[in-house]
Image (spheres, rainbow, N blue to C red):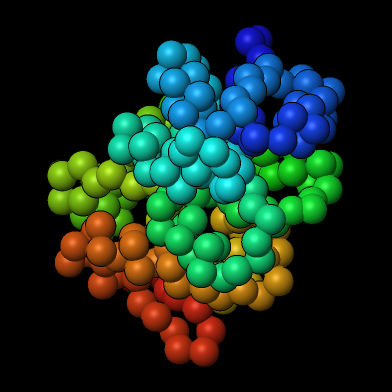
Amino acid sequence: MDKLKILVVDDESRMRKLVKDFLIKNNYDVLEAEDGAAAVDIFFEQNDISLIILDVMMPKMDGWQVCREIRTYSKVPIIMLTAKADERDELQGFELGVDEYISKPFSPKILVARVEAILRRTNQAGADELLEAGGIRIDKAAHNVTVDGQPVELSYKEFELLTYFVENKGIALSREKILNSVWNYDYFGDARTIDTHVKKLRSKMGEKGDLIKTIWGMGYKFEAE
């Protein structure tokens, strides 16, 4: 089986080497870019990058610009690295379709665990895994969604969130449970992550967004006939 390819983007060579060494130890192929412009060039030259680890502060083109550029064409999972712990940065990242957000300094082992969790969910197939509820059809193998027969473009994390809601139809889900199940780790009770994604998901689903009900003070519930 071919190794999965990861693009590591950071203007600090020491940081790139640290991340690269841990990823190679865990059997990944790693490509490197020292700035945002190089990252975009490499991404579009290669057609088989499975995940991007992207620093925010970089010369020529910062991480936000890189994310916008790539998200125009691709839903490839993106993990954003930042030296800031500003919640506005974090929310901006999720609005742009970032899948994970990790503040420096971080544990390389934790980063690899996040990478593995994302790739495991992205690549786990099941060719016959189709979910349908309330006019929403989810093809887990093809990773696509239609609403009343019309395709809906979702980010990787929005897709995972909608799938989780439909799989747990009619069940009240706390924010903590959603974070643990969809993000695969405890986000220290930070509900903004969930609320930001639900808001975007509802808007993309049009009228069917109303099927995701808010349970005040607790979380959400997906209801469909």
Decide if residue 126 is on the left or right side of residue 70.
right
**In the image, farthest residue toward the bottom:** 217
Decide if residue 138 is on the left or right side of residue 30.
left
In this rendered view, identify the residue nearer to me: 168 or 184: 184
Number of on-image labels: 0
In this rendered view, identify the residue nearer to me: 109 or 62: 62
Q: Determine whether 110 is above or below 86 in the image.
A: above
Decide if residue 11 is on the left or right side of residue 43.
right
Q: Residue drawn 15% across and 51% down?
A: 148
Q: Residue drawn 51% across and 44% down?
A: 63
**In the image, farthest residue toward the top:** 1
Q: Position of residue 198 (x, y in %)?
A: 40, 66
Q: Is residue 38 visible?
A: yes
Q: Residue drawn 45% across and 72% down?
A: 195
Question: Where is the C terminus found, in terms of image quarters?
Answer: bottom left
Q: Position of residue 217 (x, y in %)?
A: 52, 89
In this rendered view, identify the residue nearer to me: 30 or 57: 57
